[in-house]
Image (cartoon, rainbow, N blue to C red):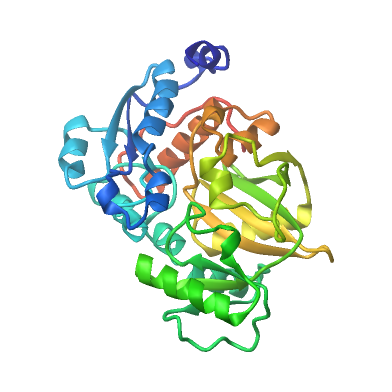
Amino acid sequence: MQQKAAKNQPNKQKSKLPKRIVILHSDVKREYFPTEAQYITEKDADQDAALIAGYLQQLGIATRLLAGNSDLPAMLRKFKPQIVINLVDSVKGDESRAADIPGLLELLEIPYTGAGVLGLSLDTNKFLVMKLLQQGGVPVPHFQLFNTPRDPIEPILRFPLISKLNSVHGSVEITQDAVSEEEKHLRRRLRYLIHTYQQPVLVEEFISGREITAILMEGKKKRVYQAEKIFTQPRGKYTFLTFEDQWLSAPQAAFHYAAYEDPLLADYVKKAFNAVKMNGYGKFDMRLDHSGRYYFIDTNCNPAFGPKELDVALSVILDMYGISFYKILMQLIKNAARDSLKKNQPAATIIHSAAPG
């Protein structure tokens, strides 16, 4: 990996890089999570962070890995990073507490990558995100939030319906059983999800058709990179990416990305990015129905981050556009330094080398 990294490494003499960077990752213990499935989505957080650290060390940057737990404030004061790369997805297994991390970094006046407190808070309320998208002119399926399994079904909803945990990402519980064709099945799903995870469930009309993923990267401009998921394994009656596809299959065993581009979709993505208060980068999943209409079905601020070796959508898709992981890293660091200047915080030196945007 290091030889390959060195080959693609930017000219360090043309760049002014921070000298000290901290990579924050989730503190993951099995007892924090209600199910094995949710634990699986984060269990390798420290290993993924270590792989990213290798890229920064190739650039001559002193890099420290820290877990997002109660020791973090003292460790940050000790190491005194110029930039923090925030990869924390949960605190003690609770994704809604991920917003604690940018709050702490704001208090300590340390520049960081990705979304702030508001963006991360919204990210773990899918119902509110759908409302904001709808209000902002971004097309979404009909949807309803269920706080109990007995809530009446709103007349606007039409089967088939797909049920999702309102505050958990990572395709947790998105299985072939997630789609309901009649009320009895839906009620059974709601009872299981609400009881197991102790949170509301978002139910949406299932949109048949193609699935598109888009990555937005901020630079001088917002640039959108699109790709279509091409499923390579037989599906059931409904075609969509499941938890098993994402976490239990070999990389690219279930699907691969193909080039896709539509200026209309790019405009929608930019509206969505602004509506849900993302920063730096974001990931969006859409369905394209048989009539050519888009529907946004998922948004992720601070999406899974890492090089192509980790098979994350961000790097795989941007690589299709000739953008290396080094350029992604440098753009995010540059964004963090820029944002800290806006807040009158002590910022790390802004990178002057080429980056997307």
Q: Which residue is depicted at the point 70% across and 52% down?
A: 235
Residue 123, above or below 249:
below
> Would you say 35 lies left or right of 78 here?
right
Q: Position of residue 143 (x, y in %)?
A: 59, 76
With 301 as the anchor, is 194 left or right in this view?
left
Asked if one can make out residue 14 in the rendered structure from this viewpoint, the answer is yes
Task: Determine the residue positioned at 56% across, 57% down.
Answer: 175
Residue 17 sits above or below residue 181 on the image: above
Residue 17 percent coordinates (x, y): 41, 24
In the rendered view of the protein, which quadrant contains the C terminus? top right
- Residue nearest the observer in this picture, 204 or 242: 242
* In this view, 175 is above or below 308: below
Please indicate whether residue 151 sits to the left or right of residue 77 in the image: right
In this rendering, position of residue 297 left or right of residue 65: right
Taking depth in this image into account, of 155 and 50 the one nearest to the observer is 155
Snapshot quadrant of residue 87: top left
Q: Residue furthest right?
A: 291
